[in-house]
């Protein structure tokens, strides 16, 4: 979706029709009302949302932040699971390894684990 948003916004600004089909993903401009329809799924399970031009521009601008955040979450997943497994049975705070991901608030994670256990 992120790679098609700029082209969709440009087409809407020029009042041109724009359509993308990428597997189950579909994006098109159904009318000249400066809006687009984004759909995901097959006919049976298809979900669609309508976006105005200003909303598409906003999404286009924040997608790089969302992409970077998802990369950080993916990179941290193994450190997170290792920490949870090693600290779940402990009553005192367990220091994370020195090479653990710096984006995880381990002390807060430990407190959350203790609250649910």
Image: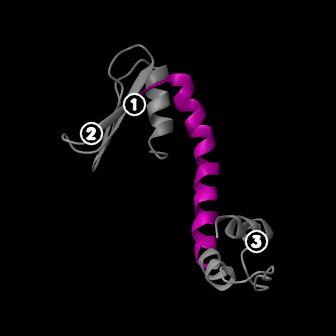
Q: Is residue 52 magenta?
A: yes
How far apart marks 2 and 3 lie (CA) works out to 39 Å
- Single out the mark in the foreground, 3 or 1: 3
Which residue does the numbered mark 1 point to in the structure image? Answer: 49
In this view, 42 is above or below 98: above
Q: Is residue 11 magenta?
A: no
Residue drawn 57% across the image and 31% down it: 57
Which residue does the numbered mark 3 point to in the structure image? Answer: 106
Query: Percent x, y for residue 50?
Result: 41, 26
Q: Which residues are magenta?
A: 49-78
Which mark is first along the chain, 1 or 3? 1
Is residue 3 left or right of 41 when viewed as pictured? Answer: right
Query: Percent x, y for residue 26?
Result: 32, 39
SS for dot 3? helix
In this view, 86 is above or below 20: below
Residue at the top extreme? 33
How far apart marks 1 and 2 lie (CA) works out to 10 Å
Residue drawn 76% across the image and 71% down it: 106
- Give the total number of marks visible in the rendering: 3
SS for dot 2? loop
Quadrant assignment, res 107 = bottom right
Residue drawn 59% across the image and 77% down it: 81
Q: Are marks 3 and 1 in contact (CB under 8 Å)?
A: no
Which residue does the numbered mark 2 point to in the structure image? Answer: 46
SS for dot 1? strand
**Neighbour tally class for label 1: few under 14, some 14-19, many 20 plus, Cα within 10 Å:** few
Quadrant assignment, res 91 = bottom right
């Amino acid at each position: 979706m992120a790679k098609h948003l700029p082209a969709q916004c440009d087409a809407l600004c020029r009042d041109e029709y724009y359509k993308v089909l990428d597997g189950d993903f579909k994006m098109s401009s159904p009318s000249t009302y400066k809006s687009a329809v984004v759909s995901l799924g097959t006919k049976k399970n298809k979900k669609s949302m309508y976006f105005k031009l200003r909303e598409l521009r906003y999404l286009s601008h924040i997608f790089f932040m969302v992409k970077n955040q998802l990369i950080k979450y993916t990179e941290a997943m193994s450190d997170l699971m290792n920490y949870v497994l090693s600290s779940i049975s402990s009553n005192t705070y367990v220091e994370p390894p020195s090479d653990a991901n710096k984006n995880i608030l381990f002390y807060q994670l430990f407190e959350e684990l203790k609250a649910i256990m």
